Amino acid sequence: MSLNSIAKTAKTVNSFLLSRLYGNPAHLYDAASHLIAHGGKRLRPYMVIKSCEILGGTAKQALPAAAAVEMIHNFTLVHDDIMDNDDLRHGVPTVHMKFGIPVGILAGDVLFSKAFEIISSESKMPKEVSLALVSKLAQACVDVCEGQILDIMMAQSQKIPSENQYIRMIEKKTSALFEVSCAMGAICANTKRKDIVNLSSFGRNLGIAFQIVDDLIGIIGDSKITKKPVGNDIREGKKSLPILLAINKARGHKKEKILDAFGNSSISKKEIESVIKTINSMGIESIVRKKAMQYSNAAKKSLMSYDGTAKKELISLLEFVVERNL
């Protein structure tokens, strides 16, 4: 994948974002731009811009929509970190740890509000296009909230969810923002409904593949690369796809071993490593990678009728997402 292309887009998006996140009191805007100033690949804005370009639009006309999606993404991260009481993100203190919970909540709210301000007042599009962008993004925000509550309910339930329940949850919680990124890019190109449907389908399937692989890395990832403790998801009792599959597939002593470790915060590093070894011995990685590949193939199918550089860039992003180890 051309990481240069992503880095170049990220640079443009970052300067646009930071130029819009200022005001008084400055403390609030420092909090709102804190995570943006400290990294992130900007995959979603990249998808907005490339989805616009694949249909003959330009990066310039898609930039406000791309920035808006990234603001919404950051809004979800800020509020997520508060809900999960997380201390670090991108290797720096989370917004609420650095600025306090009340300012953290308000920083998230500012990001949310600014996103809609930008697409409604800065996109320089015909009124009906701006309206379509606002409507799409608002629907995606509702989906993310529904997905988040499904995740919370799943975590609180004693039951192990089915694979379908899990996919439904990530489709809303994670995939909705990938889907809307591509849909908004297509809308910015002022295009036909069929193109919006095709690009939306690409984004949705890429988003599901992204989360499935992310969950896999949460189990088998190298902590030096991921900057997260090994087997953290097992220790925290996170009902991610690899863990669901492992619990459902395991029998006897293996099953007992996984269930004993699941959600056990006092488990030792050695015991976690032993559980990971057990999960690996069951071939879970290849099953999960295969599932991610199914969604990847469905995403590729959605772009069959297009060609050009932007298509190649979207496909190579998809391949990076499915094959990555971090």
Image: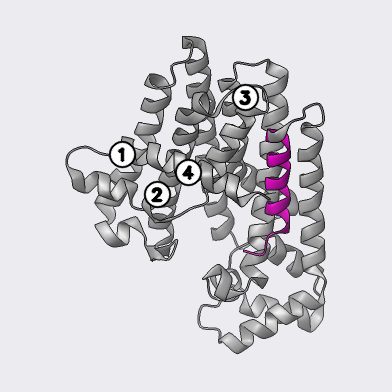
Residue type (three-letter) at the residue carrying disc 3: Ala
Distance (Cα) linking label 3 and label 4: 19 Å
Distance (Cα) linking label 2 and label 3: 25 Å
Secondary structure, mark 1, is: loop
Q: Disc 3 marks which residue?
A: 186
Q: Is mark 2 in CB contact (under 8 Å) with mark 1?
A: yes
- Sequence-earlier tag: 4 or 2: 2
Q: Disc 1 marks which residue?
A: 21
Q: Quadrant of residue 180?
A: top right
Residue type (three-letter) at the residue carrying disc 1: Leu
**Foreground residue, 205 or 50?**
50
Q: Disc 2 marks which residue?
A: 36
Residue range of the region highlighted in magenta in the rendering: 310-326
* Colour mapping: one colour
Q: Disc 4 marks which residue?
A: 73
Residue at (44, 55) in percent of width and height: 39
- Sequence-earlier tag: 1 or 4: 1
Q: Is residue 267 above or below residue 203?
A: below
Image coords of residue 110 (percent x, y): 31, 38
Is 267 placed left or right of 91 in the picture? right
Residue type (three-letter) at the residue carrying disc 2: Ile
Distance (Cα) linking label 1 and label 4: 15 Å
The crowd level at tag 1 (other Cα within 10 Å; few <14, some 14-19, many 20+) is: some
